[in-house]
Every structure is written in C-alpha cells, then in structure tokens.
Amino acid sequence: MIEQLSTLLESWGISKAGEQLAFLLDPANIPFAIWETLYAPFLAAVFAYVIGMPLGILLVTGEENGIHPLPKPLMTVLNAVINLLRSVPFLILMVLVFPLSRLILGTTIGTTATIVPLTVAAAPYVARLVESSLREVDRGVVEAAQSMGCTTWQIVTKVMIPECKPGLISGATNALITILGYGAMAGSIGGGGLGAISLMRGYGRNQMLVLYVAVIILVILVQIIQSVGTALCVKTDKRITHK
C-alpha cells in the first residue's frame, strides 16, 4: 500500500515520496510535533493572560475618567511600553529575548525555550484585547455599581468582566491562534513542532509532501480552536436566545 502510494505521488512530481511517507507515518514524528505545537502556545497563552489581563484592566480602570484613576505619567509609560512591545516583529523580539530565555530556562533552543518569547510577545497583545473588551461595557452599568458603593475590585470582577465575557472569550481565541502562529514561525530559529518540520524539513530539504501535510495540520488546529472559541462565545452571550 505504501509503495503504491509512493509510486503515485512520484508520478505527480513529488520526488522521494517513499522517504517522506516513512517520515510522516512514524509515530515519533508528526504526533510529537503536534504535541510540541500545542503545549508551548497554550502555556504561553496562560502566562500571557496572567500578565496581560491585569494590564488591560489597569488601562481601563486607571485612565483619567476610569473608576480608579492612576497618575497620568504612570499610564503614559504603561501605554508606551505596551505599544513598543507590540510594534516589534516576533522573530526579532524572540532574538532579543534569548538572554531572558537562557536565564529562566537555561537554553534558547527547542520548543520549551519558545515559551518565554511567546509570552513576552503575546502579553501586550492580550492587554489590548482585554482593554478593548472592557471598553464595550455599558458605562451606565458601571456608574450604577459605583452609586451602590461597590469597590473597584467588585466592579471589575462582578460587573465588568461578566458583562464582557463573550468579548473576552473571543479575544482569547484570537490570542491563542496568534500565539500558535508565532510558535510556528519560531521553528525557523530553533523552535520545534510543526513549524520546524515544515520549514526545516519540508522547505529546507524540498520535501513538499511533508510541507503540505504540516501546513494542513496547522490549518486544522486553527479551525478547531476557532470553532471551540466561537461556540463558547455564543453560549455566554446574553443577547442570544439559547433554546
């Protein structure tokens, strides 16, 4: 069966199809690459939200007309740092963060080492996503909570976050997909996973079958994440009548 498929693929102009099929069918290759592709972005997304969500909340609550205004110089510096980190292309940022990866993890090579630069790149993006979602909350609802004597913490946790939950879930979905894309790009400079397979083995060795399969799997993973995120977003949206 494999030999017949190899012959068919070679007739389509795919050279060394047998070697590529053997690589793709080896359980130690593609399944492990899928695991690497998922675990680093998921961990980076968690760490990015641990850092980025409080920053996003501060951007809204700490502004001049917010529920807990902070010093204007502090807000200016915070916005400038977030904008600066967001403006640096990921591959360049990854190289710049190599010393931090080496300090924390002891290495700059491999899938685990990409968690640090992925987190640094995603945290400011998450902060802006959270900020955008919180700004969609009806100002009247916040003012009503203030008039009832609610504290800043109560307003944020009991009013603002529950009210914009669909937006937060949608933002988290977009953030995870973006981080997954960053992780695939990291394969070009020492990261692992499907990105490394498609770039190093597929493109680098001109093994187009490996390249196509890796890209298709990445597309499927993105579709799954997007579908789950959309379903959760719809389920938590109070404006939609659920039967």
Image: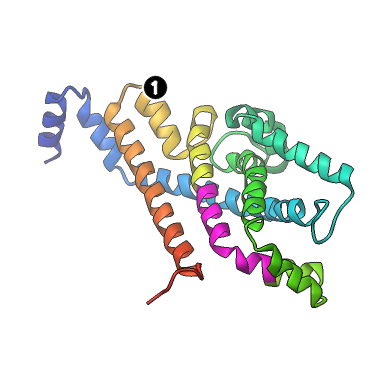
* Residue 229 in the image: above or below residue 128: below
Picture coordinates of residue 157, whole percent (x, y): 70, 69
Q: Nearer the viewer, residue 169 or 6?
A: 169
Disc 1 target residue: 204
* Residue 123 in the image: above or below residue 11: below
Residue segment shown in magenta? 159-176
Picture coordinates of residue 87, whole percent (x, y): 65, 31
Q: Is residue 153 left or right of residue 182?
A: right
Q: Quadrant of the N terminus?
A: top left
Residue depicted at x 46% and y 44%: 37
The main secondary structure of the magenta stretch is helix
Q: Quadrant of the C terminus?
A: bottom left
Q: Residue furthest front?
A: 140
Q: Nearer the viewer, residue 240 or 222?
A: 240
Disc 1 marks a residue whose amino acid type is Gly
Q: Secondary structure at mark 1?
A: loop
Q: Can residue 181 be seen by looking at this rendering?
A: yes
Q: Nearer the viewer, residue 8 or 55?
A: 55
Is residue 52 highlighted in magenta?
A: no
Q: Can residue 154 be seen by looking at this rendering?
A: no
Residue 86 position by quadrant: top right
* Residue 23 in the image: above or below residue 55: above
Residue depicted at x 42% and y 52%: 226
Q: Residues within 10 Å of mark 1 (few under 14, many from 20)?
A: few
Picture coordinates of residue 69, whole percent (x, y): 85, 55
Is residue 170 highlighted in magenta?
A: yes
